[in-house]
């Protein structure tokens, strides 16, 4: 049995409002209970262009504005379960993390709600919007120069050392499997429920790999339980990342670069280990931006660069499968988080990238 009671099917999503579908839910106990449970939105033009149902999980609707609220909550709850953080204790506790920004935002908000301090280490190259937002919500923000992972000055290593030196909890989102577990029990369960188990493929990009790995594990588990074929799991990778080559030919070498933030890797994070990934597609920035601008202009959906990569990948996957299939992807965060880059004609022209018509 599929666990769905949702009146919509994957190919014909309901026109009922979200509230009507949810049956006017009871108030959430707190902000934490409002994380997850995001809508799965049919992307009209992508669906029409491919003859498939292309569905985007609206993760920008989480309280912190991104998919990373889920990982932040899962990591903090796991640390509490292990007794490394104690909610409500007089001294509280401190959680330290290296992040491209969104995990830092999620961790800081969850920490605020649970009575902890957060220390966030972030490369200074990330968007001003994320930096400003982290400061606004009270994160103890440490900006560091962007360095490759092999350099001890890389933000991940700086955050690990800071936690070691101060006795704080290190979130370690790349290798901490609580991250993918949060997606396995949350994101994957929701997608299965929202599609009635009728999805042919899932695709998304990887930063830590928590989303892709958790989706792969959770969707496979549910397909086996319900006696349905498992969806095809496809990595979407930007230029400048080694993961495409790793999936295709076990080769992590890197070429090119991308203006997208929060995705792409030069190593295989612990969260991706032992997980089924059937294929990979590589998406360049112009192809991703086309989707970012198109969705905003014609469907009123504001998404960030990694979501643009994901939607472009979903279109490629749908084309390869042929008409009549259902492809699910992740709308990781919103365009507002990158206004000064993705919607800045000067920045885009300097990078040789397309400028949206209404800003040109
Ligand atoms: N998109 C954005 C905007 C992100 O911040 C991140 C996380 N760094 C991702 C995608 C990737 O998610 P994950 O870490 O689960 O692979």
Image (cartoon, rainbow, N blue to C red):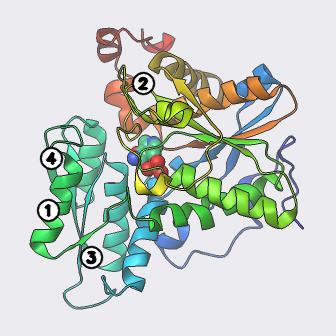
Q: Residue 105, how many percent across, how many down?
A: 34, 56
Residue on which disc 2 sits: 239
**Closer to us: 69 or 15:** 69
For the C terminus, the quadrant is top left
C-alpha separation, residue under disc 4 versus residue under disc 3: 21 Å
Residue 136, quarter of the rendered image: bottom left
Q: CA distance from mark 2 to mark 4?
A: 24 Å
| Residue at 49%, 76% in the rendered image | 30
Q: Residue at x 73, y 41 (%)?
A: 201
| Tag nearer the camera, 4 or 1 | 1
- Foreground of the two, 96 or 350: 96
Spatial CA span between label 4 and label 1: 15 Å
Disc with the residue nearer the chain's start (2 vs 1): 1
- Whether tag 4 and tag 1 are in contact, CB under 8 A, the answer is no
Res 27 quadrant in image: bottom right
Q: Which residue is mark 3?
A: 116
Mark identifier at residue 161: 1
Question: Neighbour class for label 2 at 10 Å: few (<14), some, many (≥20)?
Answer: some
């Amino acid at each position: 049995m599929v666990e769905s009671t949702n009146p919509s099917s994957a190919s014909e999503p309901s026109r009922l409002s979200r509230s009507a579908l949810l049956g006017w839910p009871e108030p959430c106990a707190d902000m934490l209970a409002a994380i997850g449970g995001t809508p799965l939105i049919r992307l009209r033009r992508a669906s029409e262009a491919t003859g498939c149902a292309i569905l985007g999980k609206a993760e920008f609707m989480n309280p912190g504005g991104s998919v990373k609220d889920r990982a932040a909550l899962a990591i903090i709850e796991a640390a509490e379960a292990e007794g490394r953080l104690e909610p409500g204790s007089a001294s509280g506790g401190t959680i330290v993390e290296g992040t491209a920004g969104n995990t830092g935002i999620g961790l800081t908000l969850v920490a605020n709600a649970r009575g902890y301090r957060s220390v966030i280490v972030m490369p200074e190259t990330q968007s001003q919007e994320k930096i400003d937002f982290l400061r606004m919500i009270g994160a103890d923000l440490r900006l560091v120069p962007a360095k490759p992972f092999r350099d001890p000055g890389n933000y991940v290593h700086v955050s690990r050392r800071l936690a070691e030196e101060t006795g704080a909890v290190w979130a370690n989102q790349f290798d901490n499997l609580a991250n993918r577990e949060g997606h396995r029990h949350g994101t994957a369960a929701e997608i299965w429920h929202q599609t009635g188990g009728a999805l042919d493929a899932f695709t998304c990009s990887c930063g830590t790999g928590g989303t892709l790995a958790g989706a792969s594990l959770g969707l496979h588990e549910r397909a086996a339980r319900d006696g349905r074929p498992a969806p095809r799991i496809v990595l979407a990778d930007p230029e400048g990342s080694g993961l495409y080559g790793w999936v295709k030919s076990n080769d992590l070498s890197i070429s090119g670069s991308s203006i997208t933030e929060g995705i792409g890797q030069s190593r295989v994070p612990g969260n991706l280990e032992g997980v089924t990934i059937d294929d990979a597609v590589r998406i360049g920035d112009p192809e991703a931006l086309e989707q970012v601008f198109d969705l905003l202009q014609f469907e009123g959906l504001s998404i960030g660069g990694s979501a643009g990569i994901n939607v472009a990948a979903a279109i490629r996957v749908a084309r390869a499968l042929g008409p009549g299939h259902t492809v699910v992807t992740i709308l990781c965060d919103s365009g507002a988080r990158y206004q000064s880059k993705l919607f800045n004609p000067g920045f885009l022209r300097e990078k040789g990238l397309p400028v949206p018509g209404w800003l040109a």
